[in-house]
Amino acid sequence: MLITIIELLIVLLALYLGSKFGSLALGAIAGLGLALLVFDHGLKPGTPPTDVIYIIVAAITCAGILQASGGMDWLIQVAERQLRKHPGRITFYAPLSTFFLTILVGTGHVMYTLMPIITDVAIKKGIRPERPCAVASVASMIAIVCSPISAAVVAFSTISALNGFPISILQIVSVTIPACLVGILIAAAWSTRRGLDLDKDPEFQACIADPEQREMIYGNTQTVLDKKIDKKAKIAVGIFVGAIILIALLALFQQILPSWDSVKAVEGAKDVVLPTGKTVSPGNLANAGIVMAGVTEKVSVTIKMYLVIQIILISAAALMIIVCGAKPKNAVADNVWQSGMVAVVAIYGIAWLANTFFNAHLGEIQSMLGTMVENHKWTIALMFFIFSVLINSQAAVVVSLLPVAYALGIPGWVLLGVLPCAYGYFFIPNYPTDIATVNMDRTGTTRIGKYVFNHSFMIPGLIAVVVSTIIAYGLSYMFYH
């Protein structure tokens, strides 16, 4: 037991140090923890989640090329027009804008361009920017479990299929989108009354008494409407959206996917002794494509959906390069690609580390948590949330904990219902989107409090996650129980 605790401390220390240094350190330091478990403690290394990582790379490539084509700028312009058209409703429209942009492109980091515009609209209307900004930041992140091309959703579908709960990406988002949308709207409704209006806030009024501060706050106008959008950028958006729709349709009608003949071992078949005297397992015969009565059999195999997603996304990226003139060099330099590749490294290291630890101690985990999970299956939500606070990645939470949850006997519908709890990293405001939001609010109303936890994102985040989880749990029960 003492050894298990020491190994758990190694995992937690690696996650803590990784989150402290941030960026690529998440994956790299997790790799150091993995090295200690394998070489010092002798644990058998788990399997890195390569299938999920390949899909993430394909999605990042496609979204990065979209940004390089100028398509992302056009989407931001569309969002800005709506925000400026209805400035009085900025506290609702801002989170809706970041929510749906994340759903479309699969990453919440798209909000960096939109957040200064949200702040500007709120200031010009006299609305406290903290109200729309904080909930918009939360919306951009919780929407990751609603995007058909996000790593978290794809990982959930892939891992669930391997554990006897075959659920398509379309089925997942049909639960998470309405649930998270309601959660965000309720968080926005609460936010409309938070804090004092700017004209009644003595701290803000004292700030703008300084002419330089007043000019800095009111003298600038943040906008992307003056940016010229090429026609090819709009075509790129069409290609991108078309790819997502095609993925959704193929997930719905998998019977039209290509298939081919293959060979598999017959269940229960014994090893075969060849005339040469060599013993061969049924699995090796199947891998060699050899059909042998009673040992192997010919079957029809349909292409896996995770491969379909990869093919379509990289093909869409290629079309945007060829047809729309998107420059791959620009894609690599932009924030969507860079933040996405950081996520890949984090998932690679963290999931491999967690997989190694959990596989080695699954029996002990089952004995410790078995009764609680059996009687109160929803408590897995707490594990999702706490793990997310530690590692700042919904995809890493899903890849690391979902196999363990299935091994504990938790039904797939329960895990789908608590999926919004994979977003918990607003709890400690050290994630780039939260920090950026604080920096972009030039009025200073969006802030990290003196005691760290009393920050602007805490209550909107808790409202959004709790409400979304309750609704998702109910919808999942209705549809998949």
Image (cartoon, rainbow, N blue to C red):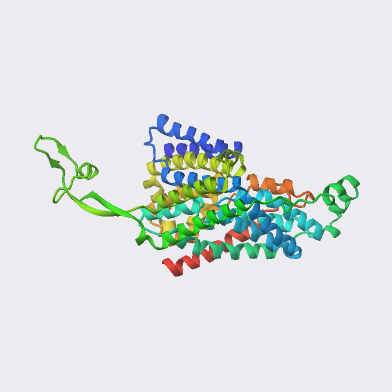
Q: Is residue 281 above or below residue 110?
A: above
Q: Give percent across and percent down for residue 38.
A: 40, 33
The quadrant the C terminus occupies is: bottom left
Residue found at x 44% / y 40%: 352
Residue 226 makes an appearance in the image = yes
Q: Answer with the quarter of the image where residue 2 lies.
A: top left
Instruction: Decide which of 321, 337 is in the foreground and name it.
Output: 321
Q: Is residue 429 above or below residue 475?
A: above
- How many numbered callouts? 0
Q: Give percent across and percent down for residue 201.
A: 84, 57
Q: Residue furthest bottom?
A: 478
Left or right of 168: which side holds 178? right
The quadrant the N terminus occupies is: top left
Left or right of 206: which side holds 419? left
Residue found at x 31% / y 54%: 259
Residue found at x 14% / y 42%: 272
Q: Give percent across and percent down for residue 407.
A: 38, 52
Residue 426 makes an appearance in the image = no
Q: Residue furthest top?
A: 40
Q: Give percent across and percent down for residue 211.
A: 91, 47
Residue found at x 74% / y 52%: 226
